[in-house]
Image: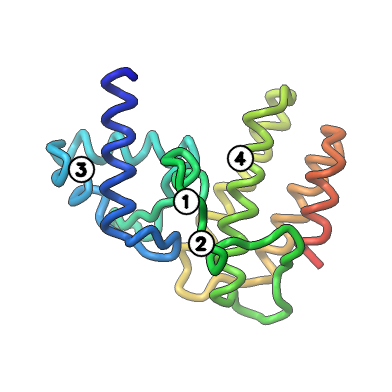
Amino acid sequence: MTTDDITTTSYLNELYQQTEGDVNKQASMYEVGIAIGLDKSNAGSLAEELMVQGKVELKTLSGGIGITTEGLAFLGIAVASSQASGGDQKLSEGTVVSDSDRSAIEAMTAEVRAIISKNQLEYALVEEIVLDLKTVEVQMLSPHPKTAILREIFRSLQNSFETAKCDDTAAALKLFCG
């Protein structure tokens, strides 16, 4: 294990402790870093790197972060059944995202990230998928994320996976959108 791997694991473990392993809770990216001996700058850089990898999610613009299901998997921790979306969950019909929708969205975005990292997709398609995922993240920063907007983003992701001939993922996204 390299020093970078040890630092990453330590950071994720500390984030896991501070959020009590709940993907819906948040902690300060800086406080997590300070707890493992990083300065503010290095803590922010590591958090950004982990966001790109999908192991950490930005919750607030002031540096609030949460661990993702992918981050938990990296640590070898199974997601509690109350946090898991399940393969058959879909977005609710409400105007605003519910708590169960938040968990489902987190799980679906983690699944999409895992799929793009496992498949050899064209660069332009990967870029489109990543931008859609970023749009999901930005919408989820709202105090009242709109279900209709998120549904359309996931439909866009479905179209991208249909283009890539990733039929299982496209079918899961179609079911998720309802």
Q: Is residue 173 left or right of residue 106?
A: right
Q: Earlier in the sequence, mark 4 or mark 1?
A: 1
Residue that carries the numbered disc 1 in the rendered image: 68
Residue that carries the numbered disc 4 in the rendered image: 113
Q: Earlier in the sequence, mark 2 or mark 3?
A: 3
Circle 4 packing at 10 Å, graded few (<14), some (14-19), many (20+), is many
Q: Secondary structure at mark 2?
A: loop
Cα gap from disc 2 to disc 1, whole angstroms = 12 Å
Q: Quadrant of the C terminus?
A: bottom right
Q: Quadrant of the N terminus?
A: top left
Cα gap from disc 3 to disc 1, whole angstroms = 17 Å
CB-based contact (under 8 Å), mark 2 and mark 1: no
Q: Amino acid under label 4?
A: Arg
Q: Amino acid under label 3?
A: Gly
Circle 1 packing at 10 Å, graded few (<14), some (14-19), many (20+), is many
Cα gap from disc 4 to disc 3, whole angstroms = 25 Å
Quarter assignment of residue 49: top left
Q: Earlier in the sequence, mark 3 or mark 1?
A: 3
Residue that carries the numbered disc 2 in the rendered image: 80
Circle 2 packing at 10 Å, graded few (<14), some (14-19), many (20+), is few
Q: Amino acid under label 1?
A: Thr
Residue at (83%, 57%) from the top-left corner? 174
Q: Is residue 82 left or right of residue 111?
A: left
CB-based contact (under 8 Å), mark 2 and mark 3: no
Closest to the camera, between mark 2 and mark 4, is 2
CB-based contact (under 8 Å), mark 2 and mark 4: no
Cα gap from disc 4 to disc 1, whole angstroms = 11 Å
In the rendered image, residue 110, in percent from the top left (x then y), is placed at 58, 47
Quarter assignment of residue 9: top left
Q: Amino acid under label 2?
A: Ala
